[in-house]
Every structure is written in structure tokens, then in C-alpha cells.
Amino acid sequence: MSSGIAAIATPAEIAKYEPVIGLEVHVQLNTHTKIFCGCPVGFGAPPNTNVCPVCLGLPGALPVLNRKAVEMAIQAALALHCRVNPFSRFARKNYFYPDLPKGYQISQYDQPLAEHGHLEILVGGVAKRIGVTRVHMEDDAGKSIHDGFKDSDRYTYVDLNRSGTPLIEIVSEPDMRGPDEVYEYLSELKQVMQYVGVSECDMEKGQLRCDANVSVRLKGVEEFGTKAEVKNLNSFRFAKMAVDYEISRQVAVLESGGKIEQETRSYNVATGETVGMRSKEDAHDYRYFPEPDLAPLRIGEEWLVRLRDAMPELPADKRRRFIESYGLREYDVQVLTAARGVSDYFEKAAAVAGDARTAANWVIGDLLGALQGADVSASPVAAGELGELVRLIAKGEISGKMAKEIFAKMFASGESAQSIIEREGLRQISDTDSLAKIVDEVIAKSAKQVEQYKSGKTGVLGYLVGQVMKATQGQANPAVVNDLLKAKLS
Ligand code: ADP
Ligand code: ZN
Ligand code: MG
């Protein structure tokens, strides 16, 4: 249990220590059915309706491994650059809990699905590799729902719809050195899982859950300190805040001569503190043994190659390619690749536009702005249509300013740029003959400004261009008008 020592260390005290953090992340796989039975996986169904003898843990019911779950787990492992073991095994992890009807979880222990991977994160603009120790498969437990506040009026309900939902656990090496790295690791991990399509990682639905192992050591000391595990962090922000608090707490304990207990703690969102829950159980407490009802999992080379070939481009590779082949800026690339759908949209638009940088600006500024956080798949303007709009600007058929208006109309109605331009006669006037006539008229009407220009006040050119734009209701190509005016006045 936690000592009563003041939780917060001073910045000077904290500066003497280096934090060491390793994360255990559970990711729910995106299968239609559960890992060992055919019950649907869903969220929000009436309690205890998506259940059968297997996921209820009834005596004699036998598990059957879901092939799709294995394939997703393998692809997740490959995306984390893990070595997938040709032979792995399920194991029973025994513990008692009301929402665990079997009395054990089917997990993997000494022979996990995959090992020796890594995930690259950016730390202050510099790439850093965080080791991934292992990726293993397991089933989820049900849910206990606590209701009522007074002892006399307190019930706990058990909903077993979630029991048997396929999970992977991703265990990192203790390679993170601060709360920011934790945040980066989780963000990158979520992005990779979403790209590969193995999970939506919706944290509000519990599809990604994180436990943080935290220790501190005096700077310069090689040996790790004793760690505490902070359980069930259900947002990246909370994970970062909990780790931050935990570092400070541990430093305060050590600085006042105490020692860190190896324990499991939980983060209290309301107070921003971590509190001790129980001393950490050891592996032997779980009485792990090989699962007798499931055959070992053998993964042949051919299957592995097929799954590897079906993998999409990973976010890190995509970011590199966008910078190299489109010449985009780092920040723009971050925005464009945050979601796979947006990056696909951009590439389609850029191909039609013939100008990737302008297309990128339109996607980032105008499209994402108009979408107001909605998914790009809901965009009323298709990628090719936005690309066409950008192509018309590049060709000089419409001005950038006209394009903004046209885009707003496209977004509101779903109409194409071409049809809006035709209907509203919005074409930009670039042809010199018709513009020359208007330029002559403006010059004739602006004797004073023409004189000023000729006496060296070249700034009045802007006024003259403005007059031509006005006369053409904004449809003249300003660059052409500029050139014409200069030529005629020199
Ligand atoms: P346990 O046996 O307690 O489960 P493991 O060695 O399996 O511990 O590690 C569990 C997690 O804790 C891993 O993510 C690992 O990186 C992390 N970890 C291990 N030792 C430390 C430490 N001293 N400080 C911080 N994290 C650690
Ligand atoms: Zn079932
Ligand atoms: Mg362990």
C-alpha cells in the first residue's frame, strides 16, 4: 500500500532522476465474432445477449480459435516489426473475478505469438525506437457494472457480452523516458493499428487500454528502480498525466528516504493522483499452464507471406514518401497522414491536380476545415473533384479567390467545379485581346494615376489592376492584367 509521504516532488528533486517507463497496451481486434466462439462482437447490445456456452464458461464447452483474429494479430505484430513465432501456445491464466466466468483467462505466456519488434516515435523531432517485447493473443473478460452509492442500495451487475472478445496485448520494453514519449508511443501505436485495419482503437469503447509501468533512477545510475504499475488508463492525456504524477510521487518517496513498493496503482481522474490498489501479483500467482483445449498455434511461412503481402503502407513509410516524392513540409505531412482515409484522399486529389503542394494546402486548409472533424469519407466533395478545382487554378481558368467561392458551393451541394463554373459563368478572363480593351478604358479614365505612375510612383499599379478587376467583376486574371498595364504604361 502507498505510504503517506507527500506526493509531489520539487522540480529540483525531479531533475535528479530519470524516469523509466514500459507500457502494456490491450487492443481489441476488429473481428465480427469472438475469439473462441461464434458470438458477435458488438458494443451497446442489451446485457448478456451476445453469449453462448463457450463465452459463458459453461462446463464442457470447448473453444475454437477464430482464424480471422489470428490473422489480425499477425498483421498487428508485423506492423510492429516483430518476429512471428512459427509455433506459439495458449495458456490459462487463473484468477477469480465475477466477470470471468471460466475462472481463467486464455492468454499466451511462455510461447507468445510474436516478439522482438519496435515502434518508431518522434522525440523533439528526432526518431527514437521503442522496443516491443512481445505481442500475444488473449480473450477479454466481461464487465462488472457497479450501481448505487449507499451500502444498503448497492448492486453489481455482470454483463458477459464482452467475454471472449479478441484482444492482443502489446508489451513494450522499458524504453520510454518521460510522459511525452508515452503520449507519442500511444499515438503512433493507435495510428499503426488503424492503418492496418486490425482495430479502430476507439478508447471510449475500451478498444485500446493501457497500463503504465513506471520507475525512476538517479541520473547516471544504470540499474532500474522498482516499478509501480498504473492500471486502466483510458485516454492518452490521462496516461501522460498519470505517468507525470507517478514520477513525481516516486521521487518524493525516495527523496524523503522511503522506498518504492512494487504495486498496482490506479489513476484517479478527479484528483489527478495515483493510488495504491494492491501489491503486484507475481506470475506464479496465476498458476499458468498450457491450455489443454486448444492445439498449439502453427504459422507456416506461406500464410505469413500472404498476410505480409496484404499489409498496407505503414504511417512512418507513408510520411517519408510524402516528404520525398511530393516535397511537402513535415507538419503538412503529419496532418495528411494522421488518418489513412485523408492520405488516400490527398493522393487522389494530387494526381488529378498535377500540383501536389497546392492540393495539400486545399486538403489541409479548406477540406478539413469544412469537414469540422467529420470523417473524410463523409466529404460531399470527392477527391477527384477537389483535384479538378486545383487543376483549374493551375491552368489559370479560375483565380484562387474564385476557387474559394466555388469550393464552398461544391461542399454545400456536392456539385462539380465544372458545372458550377459553367452555370455561373465564373471563368477567369485570361485572354489578352479582351482584357486589353478593358485595360485601355481604365487607363483613359485614370489620367491622374497614370501620371503618378509615370513619375515613378509605381505603387499606383495596384489601384489600376483593381479597377480592371472591378470592371470584370473579379473575373480578370490579375497576373495578365498586371503585365498588360506595365507594357502599356512603359
Ligand atoms: P512483470 O513481471 O512485473 O509483469 P515485466 O518484466 O514482464 O514485469 O514487464 C512488464 C512491463 O513493465 C513491461 O512493459 C516492461 O517494459 C516494464 N518494466 C519492466 N521493468 C521496469 C522498470 N524497472 N521500470 C519501468 N518499467 C518496467
Ligand atoms: Zn460465445
Ligand atoms: Mg510480465
Image: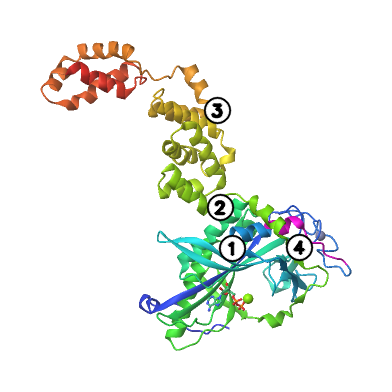
Instruction: Indicate the secondary structure of the residue bearing disc 2.
Output: loop
Instruction: Indicate the secondary structure of the residue bearing disc 1.
Output: loop
Q: Residue at x 56, y 29 (%)?
A: 414
CA separation in Å, label 4 and label 3: 45 Å
CA separation in Å, label 1 and label 4: 20 Å
Q: Nearer the viewer, mark 2 or mark 1?
A: 2
Which amino acid type is marked by label 2? Leu
CA separation in Å, label 2 and label 1: 25 Å
**Dot 1 surroundings within 10 Å: few (below 14), some, or many (20 or more)?**
some
Q: Residue 243's spot in the image, x, y percent?
A: 50, 70
The residue singled out by tag 2 in the image is 314
Seen as rendered, the residue at the extreme front is 301
CA separation in Å, label 2 and label 4: 29 Å
Q: Nearer the viewer, mark 1 or mark 4?
A: 4
Q: Residue at x 80, y 71 (%)?
A: 102
- With 396 as the anchor, is 288 left or right in this view? right
Q: Is residue 406 above or below residue 316?
A: above
What span is colored magenta in the figure? Answer: 61-72
- Tell me if I can see residue 408 in this picture: no
Q: Earlier in the sequence, mark 2 or mark 3?
A: 2
Q: What label sits on residue 95 in the rendered view?
A: none
- With 283 as the anchor, is 159 left or right in this view? right
- Tell me if I can see residue 314 in this picture: yes
**Dot 2 surroundings within 10 Å: few (below 14), some, or many (20 or more)?**
some
The residue singled out by tag 1 in the image is 234
* Residue at disc 4, CB closer than 8 Å to ligand 2: yes
Q: Is residue 63 one of those drawn in magenta?
A: yes
Report the image quarter containing ligand 1: bottom right
The residue singled out by tag 3 in the image is 413
Tag 4 and tag 3, C-beta contact below 8 Å: no
